[in-house]
């Protein structure tokens, strides 16, 4: 697992911040840092092999034979309702309130533009072109919904995410990545994990928690 530099405007698959590094295996996965590349590797490694074969012009398995989020071939697999693509049928992996990110189906359903658009029953065939979706989230969330690795690869590659300014903890000034770190959000702004009260962090590689209440 190594990375090379990219000059394209790409977003990190984990946090959606600008991604100067891309996977040097397949050149199709983008990261802000080694840390986030490492975090994403277990889900990327199978897909990486498929993309590498594609890049070399070799035959690749048909997209309906593996999960488009983690590359797993030996199922159980299902079709998504939002976009009718193949994904792990793995809702059972998820323990309620655990904040683990171990269910491909749940991750796609909860954390992508594709499924948000479907759940909100917006008109328009293409979620990535939907203005209503854009109005519902701030730019950082919007970028993340479009480019995180819970999306299918072709959507990630054709997305035009908005740029956004990094946010900082209003208490200590530390930069916070709201979609990849545990934060709390309230009237006076955003607090990092250390400055938030009573926050239980997610397990390693899990989904960060966001709470919307803190004492001002
Ligand atoms: Zn990142
Ligand atoms: Zn790769
Ligand atoms: Zn999967
Ligand atoms: Zn979808
Ligand atoms: Zn929409
Ligand atoms: Zn802080």
Image (spheres, rainbow, N blue to C red):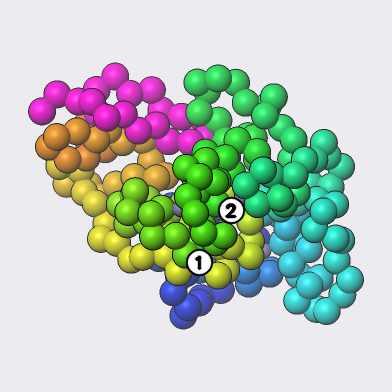
- Identify the magenta region: 196-216
Q: Does the rendering let one see residue 172?
A: no
Name the residue that disc number 1 marks: 159
Q: Residues within 10 Å of mark 2 (few under 14, many from 20)?
A: many
CA gap between label 1 and label 2 equals 10 Å
- Towards the viewer: 41 or 142: 142
Q: Would residue 194 appear left or right of 47 to someone viewing this image?
A: left
184 in relation to 148, above or below: above
Q: Position of residue 174 (x, y in %)?
A: 22, 47
Query: What is the quadrant of residue 18 in the picture?
Result: bottom left
- Whether the residue carrying mark 2 lies under 8 Å from ligand 4 is answered with yes
Task: Tell me which numbered mark, 1 or 2, is placed earlier along the sequence.
Answer: 2
Q: In what quadrant of the picture does the N terminus appear?
A: bottom right
Q: Residues within 10 Å of mark 1 (few under 14, many from 20)?
A: some
Q: Residue at x 68, y 69 (%)?
A: 26
Residue 209 colored magenta? yes
Mark 1 and mark 2 residues within 8 Å of each other at the beta carbon: yes
Query: What is the quadrant of residue 96 in the picture?
Result: top right
Q: In what quadrant of the picture does the C terminus appear?
A: top left
207 in relation to 46, above or below: above
In the structure shown, which secondary structural element does the residue marked by tag 2 occupy?
Answer: loop
Q: Would residue 152 appear left or right of 163 to someone viewing this image?
A: right
Q: Residue at x 76, y 70 (%)?
A: 52
Residue 151 is tagged as 2
């Amino acid at each position: 697992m190594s990375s090379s530099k990219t000059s394209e405007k790409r977003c990190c698959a984990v946090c959606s911040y600008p991604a100067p590094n891309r996977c040097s295996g397949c050149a199709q996965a983008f990261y802000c840092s080694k840390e986030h590349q490492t975090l994403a590797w277990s889900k990327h490694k199978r897909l990486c092999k498929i993309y590498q074969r594609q890049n070399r012009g070799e035959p690749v398995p048909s997209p309906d034979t593996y999960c488009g989020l983690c590359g797993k071939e030996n199922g159980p697999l299902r079709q998504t309702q939002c976009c009718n693509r193949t994904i792990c049928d793995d809702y059972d992996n998820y323990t309620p309130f655990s904040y683990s990110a171990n269910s491909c189906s749940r991750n796609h359903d909860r954390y992508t533009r594709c499924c948000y658009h479907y759940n909100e029953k917006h008109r328009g065939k293409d979620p990535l072109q939907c203005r209503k979706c854009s109005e519902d989230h701030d730019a950082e969330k919007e970028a993340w919904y479009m480019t995180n690795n819970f999306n299918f690869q072709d959507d990630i590659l054709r997305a035009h995410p908005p740029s956004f300014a990094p946010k900082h903890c209003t208490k200590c000034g530390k930069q916070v990545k709201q979609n990849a770190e545990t934060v709390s959000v309230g009237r006076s702004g955003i607090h990092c994990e250390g400055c938030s009260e009573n926050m239980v962090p997610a397990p390693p590689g899990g989904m960060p928690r966001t709470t919307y209440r803190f004492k001002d």
